[in-house]
Image (cartoon, rainbow, N blue to C red):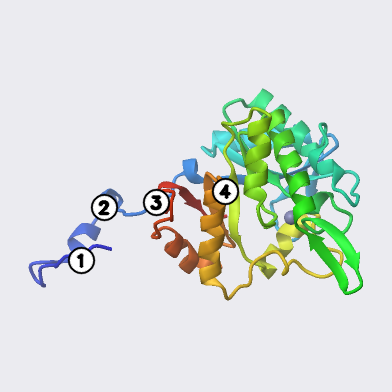
Amino acid sequence: MGSYSVAPFPIHRPRRLRQTPALRRLVRETQLHPDQLVLPLFCRSGRKLRAAVNSMPGVFQLSPDELVREAAAAVKAGVRAVLLFGIPDKKDAKASGAYARNGIVQQATRLLKHELPELLVITDVCLCEYMEHGHCGIVHQGKTGAHILNDPTLKLLAQTAASHAEAGADIVAPSDMMDGRVRAIREQLDQQGFTETPIMAYAAKFASAYYGPFREAAESAPRFGDRRSYQMDAANAQEAMREVASDLQEGADIIMVKPALAYLDILSRQSRVPLPNSGVLRQRRILDD
Ligand SMILES: [Zn+2]
């Protein structure tokens, strides 16, 4: 914030600019517009299906036909972007449904781009919805318990992102918090010719009980343990800065802090910090969720 002096009262009367709605709108520093909103949608196979999500009244798991209707209503209301989450018919230990050519998100993406070409389709890139154990990576059961394997998971995430791009996704959004996944995804996209597909990274994603209702909607709650070995510790602000910096260096085009409301200090810090080697962070869009 710049430092400038303000004339004292009664020369300066801040209330002068608060007198009418038009005046207040004219000088409003922050504007919220439907253009800036993204509607999360949950899709699963079927027809004419709207399965209520009890934890979030008004939110439904939708079959592809209903998904198109919901997205069309959003476009009509001025919201031009959706973020797709898929609930597969079958889950397994290698999340096959995540990167299947005809997986639910791939099908839904093709349909949405066909029916509503101007709609921005963003796809969630993660494995938890497709894994029988509900974790975001490959699980190895060792003597000391279950471990989420980082590097072998990268390959599946990259494959998932590329299959979404192939289906027509406008942006891919990795939410898994594995180390190095933005780079792995960027490389895979580029290799397959999707050099223009942006990556929106959940860069600083904190382990949080706030995700409970969302996991019910996406049917992605872990069957054992929790996500603390890959999602961030709530107390770590410095680490959040490093996570964001490394995602940008790996090629993220948009970064995200999640959950937003409880981490406004992190959002505020991120927007002020110059990045080593690669320009200024504030040139990137910083989104909350
Ligand atoms: Zn996940």
User: What is the three-letter code of the residue carrying label 3?
Assistant: Val
How far across and how far down the image is residue 72, in percent? 63, 32
Crowd rating for badge 3 (residues with CA inside 10 Å; few <14, some 14–19, many 20+): few
User: On the image, numbered disc 2 is attached to which residue?
Assistant: 27
Q: SS at mark 1?
A: loop
Q: SS at mark 4?
A: helix
Q: CA distance from mark 3 to mark 2?
A: 27 Å
User: On the image, numbered disc 4 is attached to which residue?
Assistant: 250
Closest to the observer, 250 or 93: 250
Q: Is residue 237 left or right of residue 216?
A: left
User: On the image, numbered disc 1 is attached to which residue?
Assistant: 3
In percent of the image, x 55 and y 68: which residue is there? 239
User: What is the three-letter code of the residue carrying label 4?
Assistant: Glu
User: On the image, numbered disc 3 is attached to which residue?
Assistant: 280
In percent of the image, x 57 and y 48: which residue is there? 250
Crowd rating for badge 4 (residues with CA inside 10 Å; few <14, some 14–19, many 20+): some
Q: Is residue 178 left or right of residue 76?
A: right
Disc 4 versus disc 3: nearer the observer? 4
- The disc, 1 or 4, on the residue closer to the chain's N-terminal end is 1
How far across and how far down the image is residue 17, in percent? 21, 58
How far across and how far down the image is residue 238, in percent? 51, 70
- Circle 3/circle 2 CB separation < 8 Å: no
Closest to the observer, 49 or 148: 148
- The disc, 3 or 2, on the residue closer to the chain's N-terminal end is 2
How far across and how far down the image is residue 240, in percent? 54, 65
- Circle 2/circle 4 CB separation < 8 Å: no
Closest to the observer, 189 or 228: 189
Q: SS at mark 2?
A: loop
User: What is the three-letter code of the residue carrying label 1?
Assistant: Ser
User: What is the three-letter code of the residue carrying label 2?
Assistant: Val
